Amino acid sequence: MAGLLDLEGLTPPEHLFTWVDVDEHLSALAADDRWPEWLRAADGWWDGLELVVSCDTRAEVAKSWLDEVFGTGSTEWHDGTLMLQLDDPRTPDFTGIPVILSPEPENADQPRRLPLLREKHITAQLAHPLERPLAKHFPGDVQILAFHSFKGGVGRTVHAVAMAETIARRGGNVLLIDSDLEAPGITWMHRAQGGQLDFSYEDLIALLQGSEDGGWSAAVDIAAAYLPNQQVGRFVSGGRVTVVPTTRRTHLGPPRIEPADLLTPGRSPYFLTEALAALAVRTGADTVVLDLRAGASELSAPVLLDPRVQRVFVTTLSHQSLEGTKTLLRQLGRRAPALEGTDPPSSVIITQYRQDVHEAQAEQARAELSDALLSSLRPLETATETDPGDTAEVDTDILSRPLLSPFREELLALPSSWDAVLRVLESCKLSDVLDSIVPAPVPIPQPDTAESRPEVDYAELRQRLADTAQPLIYAERKGMSSASGFLATDPLRRLLGDHRTDPPLALVVGAKGAGKTFMYAKACAARTWSAFAEQSGIKDVSLTLPVVPVLESDNLDNDDLTTQDLRDAFAASHGAPVEETGSSQEIKDRLREGLSRLGAEDEIGWRHLWLECLAIAAGVPPKEGRDAEASLTELSRRSRAVFVVDGLEDLLQSLNTEVKRTALRVLLIDVLAWLRSLRGRPLGLVVFVRRDLVKRAVHQNSEQLLARYEPYALRWNKEEALRLALWVTAHADALPTPMAESEIAELSYDALVDALIPVWGWKMGTEKSKEARSHLWVPAALGDFKDQVQARDVVVFLAQAARQSIPQVSWEDRVLVPSAMRKALLECSRVKISAIQDESQEIGDLLSRLQQVREPVTVPFSLDEVGLNVTEADFLVDSGVFARGNDGRYWVAEIYRHGLGFGSERRAKVLWRR
């Protein structure tokens, strides 16, 4: 069969020198489902081509088809024999091989297909995948991971070793098999360490081939007697790695027996992998990691073509390595696709590139390889065409996203011994690279007694989470003094920690839904800067300065504590008449009057107006003969305070005029600069503002301004989103095992992931399923194309998923049920679009237009399909809503796609391929 032939757009071969070329092309046509109904099989030899045909097939029909697929004039009749022409430049005469038509025998059985790259029998069955294994899983639920590369020298072996060590550190028992029968790598490391070489992979293959009963039990028993001597490490977790070297021989040479030799009649086509799983069970291992032979080799084929094997491909950015990897992935997708949700998906690791030089190339390769990985997945037959209720796009994106392992000099020249290599791998943190594809952790056995099983009412936990999360969606609307507790994120901790003794003069920048108004409300509720720090877990903050609100969001509701209460209290504290403190409405009226009175060039006038608003909030409004600067200067000599400003988007909306842009720019730059000029910096100011408003107001050097305050930016990355999810669940007292809220901010990433397992499980299915990891799925589903996840979306997700999980009584190992989590994404998408339409007129208007497109839209799409121009699309790209593909078409982030009602071309492709 054509080993790595690209079957798209097959054309007649340019040259036919021998029957081998004929055989290859017929194989390629069969694999591409281009055989006619009458052709049953083909068999080429050096002296002829036999075509097995249906009984009523005429020779002229066969001749016509051969001329079509091999090129016009490829056949002729010679002395009553049909001949297929071969190229021979030595003579102008027609030379070729005879074509023999053999009628198909009655009740003919289809020849047995084997998991090899080149199939011995060419039949129409090549258009279909190999027959699936009879058992869905390996014996003992053993997991087999196979590392392969199209080229050698790309880092395959070091990543296989890193995988084995990572699994063992997490408590797993690993058989690490060096199955590269031509160029061993792990074997030399083990030998240099002085490790025992009592039993090898070659020994196992030889024993399996010669077994009297055709089974594996005798070979497994013999192997199990020696393999305990080949352990290379035992970890604190209880895990271990046992090395199975390629050979015990010290001289080099080809293997005497190959894996393909085991595939004899009467044995399962997957005899080798099943024997390896049986060996793992016999030796107490739960995982097998194989380092395979590179290239399109039959030495690796019986392992790669078992869909139950987790296949990991390693490649560099070199063209040859990338193209070979992509082609092999597509070939495996045709021959042995992974059944989505049942089999482990294939993975790709891109290695040996420099982040500062090859970032664009790496992302391009990642996109191309992602499509190739997708082709190796086969959806369940129960899958349906994409509709707004389908969340499978998130799963396939996670399962088909290549991993990045950047260049590290330490890996260029590895030391010889095992322990030394492990030290290098640990210093390079390869375990972090592999984190998303490491198999599920091995559960620690628990005594199965009534006393050891705590009674957990999951319905009650789900109800608590739903009831707590729902009001937190718009927590600022509950008022300042309600909604006790909050998660102290890293930006907040840095803002407070950096201003233990000096008042802050800072911008807190964040996207819509990032929690700016909520943080503003909590600062006000604390009343003083030091109390705010104490509530956030930051110690040694000596600034007992009052927090004075100047402007607040229209979404902030008043309760028993109002912003006016804080202004009045501050005025009274420094002896100002309480009646002279201005209300929020008065301050907003002055600013609106300024928008109509002051010009776009009047930056001094705007600075005076902003400072006047601060003075009014402090109870020292400018009086006749004295301006705001004088009032604030006098105030600073007898009192100190931290002013806070929020709600700028309500006042200035979309910054659609130059006057509005000037007003905001002066506040962000000039007012802060003036406050810095006061001796001793007695007055602080924290401005909560949307990132997109900053960029539009500051024409020049906006990135420099944002970089200055970047440590305080409310940027919710994936880790912080997970931390928030755990905090909300703990705050709701909805964890099966309670956890103190104060502990959550200090958890490492790994500890955070582990702590969330009782919330939503290890995977979006059972622990042993082949679904996406839950801690990867959630931020991928809720994030935009800037890799940001907004706090509000996390809380909406928890509220919806918890409520829909309540009736799911069959799931008693987690609070949130996978099906409920998938459905929650749909509601999150609708809520997000609705919220943006309320908060950001410009983005909201564009999303409204997209929702009104009448024709069905499938992602990716061209701008003509949705009625947007390039400028509008670029704005949505900058906002993280859109991403532009290399072909000029656009993608929509999942958190928006469902609310827009758009379909997914990628999912449709997978369904079509089945």
Image (cartoon, rainbow, N blue to C red):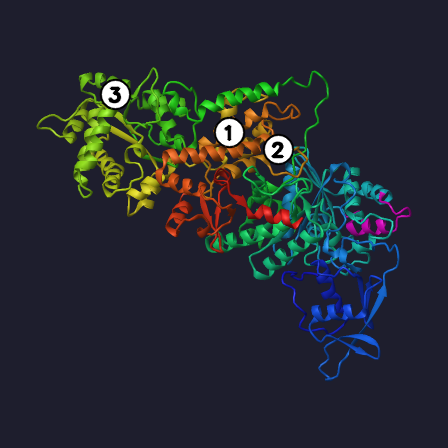
Residue 232, horizontal then vertical, whole percent: 70, 42
Residue type at mark 1? Ala
Secondary structure under the numbered disc 3 in the rendered image? helix
Residue 679 in sight from this viewpoint: no
Left or right of 628? Residue 859 is right
- Is residue 611 at all visible to an observer of this figure? yes
Three-letter code, disc 3 = Arg
Give how far apart the Cα atoms at labels 1 and 2 are: 15 Å
Q: Residue at x 56, y 32 (%)?
A: 823
Up-down relation of residue 568 to residue 140 (above or below):
above
Above or below, 208 relative to 586: below
Rounded to the nearest whole Å, what is the CA distance between mark 3 and mark 2?
49 Å
Name the spot of residue 794 as percent of width and height, x first.
Answer: 49, 31
> Do labels 3 and 2 touch, CB within 8 Å?
no
The span shown in magenta is 197-216
Q: Residues within 10 Å of mark 1 (few under 14, many from 20)?
A: many
Mark 1 highlights which residue?
725
Q: Quadrant of the N terminus?
A: bottom right
Q: Which residue is mark 2?
A: 762
Q: Nearer the viewer, residue 766 or 407?
A: 766
Looking at the rendered structure, the kind of residue marked 2 is: Trp
In the rendered picture of this protein, how many numbered marks are placed on residues? 3
CB contact under 8 Å: marks 1 and 2 = no
* Residue drawn at (77%, 68%) of the image: 61
Q: Which residue is mark 3?
A: 567
Label 2: element kind: loop
Disc 1, SS? helix
| Mark pair 1, 3: CA separation | 34 Å
Residue 802, position in %: x, y? 55, 25
